Image: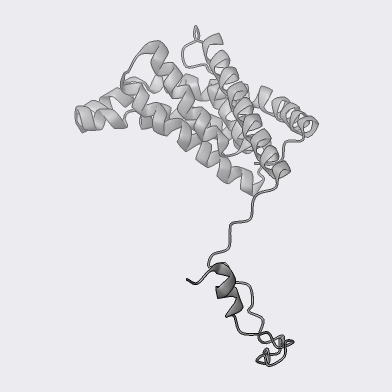
């Protein structure tokens, strides 16, 4: 019977034992290198960087919430005056200072107005009218135009508001219905044009300066 002791006794003698086989020399080349990982693990983001991004996200949500509240308050404050509104002014100012975030505010504004007044044709109009205004302001912002350019944009936007809002009626009732709807609303568009221009001339520059100071005090970078 072969016991563990007998088995151990049959192990060949080491090189330092008499009659043992010489051990191979250990060289640098004979030492196997560590197995390389087939795929490197993605570098973990530093904790402080994750916190900074989370803080920035919360700040952006808060800023958009404030913008939305101001636009809603401004709209309903002048509801009693036909085609006199502050929404155009606020969208221009917020786009100039906060950039593309205003697109989300425009969508939220449309959803809130829909929840208050119900679904109608104007919902479709809002979904392209306000984003269209925001896009034009983004272009003007890159060119660093004067305040008067924004005032003129507000006036033209008010004048053509009825024309662009008549687009759904071209599909609903045909060209005659769309054209008639636009012509019938031209007097209101003229009021809208003049009101937008006057409001922008009076309020755009002081509110623009106020927003600049607020951004500087809160250390909000250009969007």
Q: Quadrant of residue 35?
A: bottom right
Say above or below: 43 vs 120.
below
Foreground: 132 or 45?
45
Quadrant where the C terminus lies? top right
Foreground: 37 or 2?
2
Residue 161 coordinates in the image, percent (x, y): 42, 28
216 left or right, relative to 33: right
Foreground: 107 or 174?
107
Q: Quadrant of residue 52?
A: top right
128 left or right, relative to 119: right
Residue 17 coordinates in the image, percent (x, y): 72, 87
Residue 84 appears in view? yes
Residue 194 coordinates in the image, percent (x, y): 54, 23
How is colour applied across the structure in the image? one colour
Residue 149 coordinates in the image, percent (x, y): 61, 38
Residue at x-position 50% and y-position 32% = 104
Residue at x-position 22% and y-position 26% = 177
213 left or right, relative to 180: right
In this view, which residue lies farthest toward the front? 1
Residue 36 appears in view? no
Say above or below: 155 vs 81.
below
């Amino acid at each position: 019977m072969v016991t563990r002791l007998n088995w151990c006794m049959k192990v060949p003698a080491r090189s330092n034992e008499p009659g043992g086989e010489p051990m191979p020399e250990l060289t640098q080349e004979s030492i196997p290198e560590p197995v390389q990982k087939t795929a490197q693990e993605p570098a973990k983001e530093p904790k402080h960087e994750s916190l900074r991004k989370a803080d920035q996200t919360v700040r952006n949500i808060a800023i958009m919430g404030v913008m939305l509240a101001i636009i809603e308050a401004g709209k309903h404050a002048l509801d009693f005056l036909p085609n006199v509104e502050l929404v155009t002014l606020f969208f221009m100012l917020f786009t100039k200072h906060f950039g593309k975030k205003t697109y989300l505010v425009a969508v939220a504004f449309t959803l809130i107005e829909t929840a208050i007044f119900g679904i109608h044709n104007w919902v479709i109009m809002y979904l392209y009218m306000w984003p269209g205004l925001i896009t034009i302001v983004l272009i003007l912002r890159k060119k660093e135009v004067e305040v008067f350019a924004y005032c003129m944009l507000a006036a033209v936007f008010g004048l053509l508001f009825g024309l662009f809002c008549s687009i759904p009626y071209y599909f609903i009732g045909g060209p005659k219905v769309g054209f008639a709807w636009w012509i019938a609303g031209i007097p209101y568009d003229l009021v809208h044009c003049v009101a937008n221009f006057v409001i922008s001339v009076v309020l755009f520059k002081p509110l623009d300066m106020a927003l600049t100071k607020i951004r500087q005090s809160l250390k909000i970078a250009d969007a």
